[in-house]
Amino acid sequence: MKKLIIILGLVILGHGLQAQVPAPGEKQTDPILLMNGTAHLGNGEVIENAAIGFENGIITVVASNNVSQEKYRVVDIKGKHVYPGFILPATDLGLNEVSAVRATQDKAEAGSLKPNVRSIIAYNTDSEIIPTLRFNGILTAQIAPKGGLISGTSSIVHLDAWNWEDALITENDAVHLYWPRKRMSHEESKPEITARYEATINTLRDMFQDAKSFANSSGKKSNLKLEAMKGLFDGSKQLFINVAKAKDIIRSVEFAKEFGVKKVVLVDATDVLLVKDYIKENNIPVILNDVHGMPSSSDGDVDEAYKLPYLLHQEGILFCLGYSNEVMKTRNLPFYAGTSVAYGMAKEEALKSITLNTAKILNIDNKIGSLEVGKQATLFVSDGDALDMRTNKIESAYIQGRKVTLDAMQQELYQKYKTKYGH
């Protein structure tokens, strides 16, 4: 009976929460021209007193304000800033709602080798966490599974849609590999730990060998796991390797090269500077996982993570910022970029690390990531600097030209409770 009451309570709570989720924006009908604001294009350029126009969800004008306004509905944003929508890579957003409640988590399937697991079909567009990202300027995300050695296949979505089919930008874009680590144990000797580590890598080796043979075969037999990895060998999918330590970074990349994987992206890569020459030589992009993290070693600089973006930029390594440790904190993505500014990055270069650089790494820079004619009108207007939590105040946002409703449960609760105290 107690179980039944708990279940009914969760159902009622779920209906209450869903009622707070705003409906997706309507398809753009009138051409819109944002006038007189400061446009941060996302490619390093800034236009003062800019004119940003878009029609049918596509950007048609990026210029100074001396343009024809004849066919547009003009929106004056004088004194405000317009940015391309921020992009969040390698996240379990929409798969993980309340970390302490197992029933709200769908980020991992059972098993260790599961490249055929498609995160997109579990993606919940009604997640209450999604609006908290939108009103910080994050309008796009790569939804990635977790768990095991090969956790599955990710997809890239817009953060405003009725369902996952409507949200899709790129389906099944990358396979996610979690490179094994030598985990120390008091019950095992170093040789035993090393043997277990090598055995795990051999398990991966067998899987990749089978997948490569399957990709090269002309047979008609079906194998969902091997089929999901086929794109790694012709370049239609990327391999995202979650790895931290320097030796593991080199070994994991050499492993991928051994089997002819065309495109590799490193996720986390805490020790990337220790192998920077190798990274540059192999032209491998990096997703930094946590700019607000701790030093990677006991003798590391206390501000090591804060200044890592600047140091990678100085080395000419293509990188972007992400956060995959805790889904509730992903809304702080623009402020991670802001921290990198405080530790040496130029502001527009920091902006690239959550816009155009991310789009390049995800292979969607022909669609979004910067304010350029011909790209999708996925952008927002902020009252101030969007990388500063004190002035990041999103006044309006558009995804493919559709105006997005920014208010959600948090704003409704604010309106409700401010009356209690007479504000």
Image (cartoon, rainbow, N blue to C red):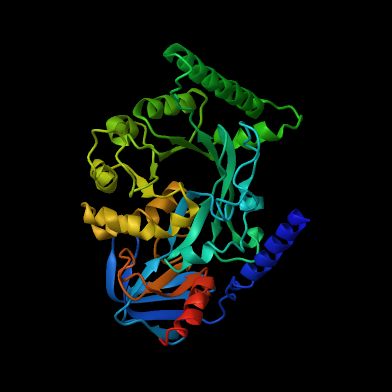
Image coordinates of residue 28 in percent, x first then y, are 56, 76
Residue 208 occupies quadrant: top right
Q: Residue at x 53, y 38 (%)?
A: 176
Left or right: residue 293 versus residue 21 is: left
Q: Is residue 220 visible?
A: yes
Q: Residue at x 48, y 56 (%)?
A: 328
Decide which of 404, 133 is in the foreground and name it.
133
Q: Residue at x 55, y 51 (%)?
A: 99
Taking depth in this image into account, of 358 and 301 the one nearest to the observer is 301
Farthest-out residue, top: 191
Position of residue 214 relative to residue 357, above or below, is above
Measured as percent of width and height from the top left, residue 146 is found at 55, 41
Identify the residue at the far front of this view.
2
Kindly indicate the quadrant of the structure image that contains residue 97.
Answer: bottom right
For residue 107, above or below residue 70: above
Provide residue 262's location: percent of width, then percent of height.
49, 34
Q: Nearer the viewer, residue 216 or 166?
A: 166
Question: In this orientation, does residue 366 appear?
Answer: no
* Residue name at image x 39 percent, y 41 percent: 285
Quadrant for the C terminus in the image = bottom left
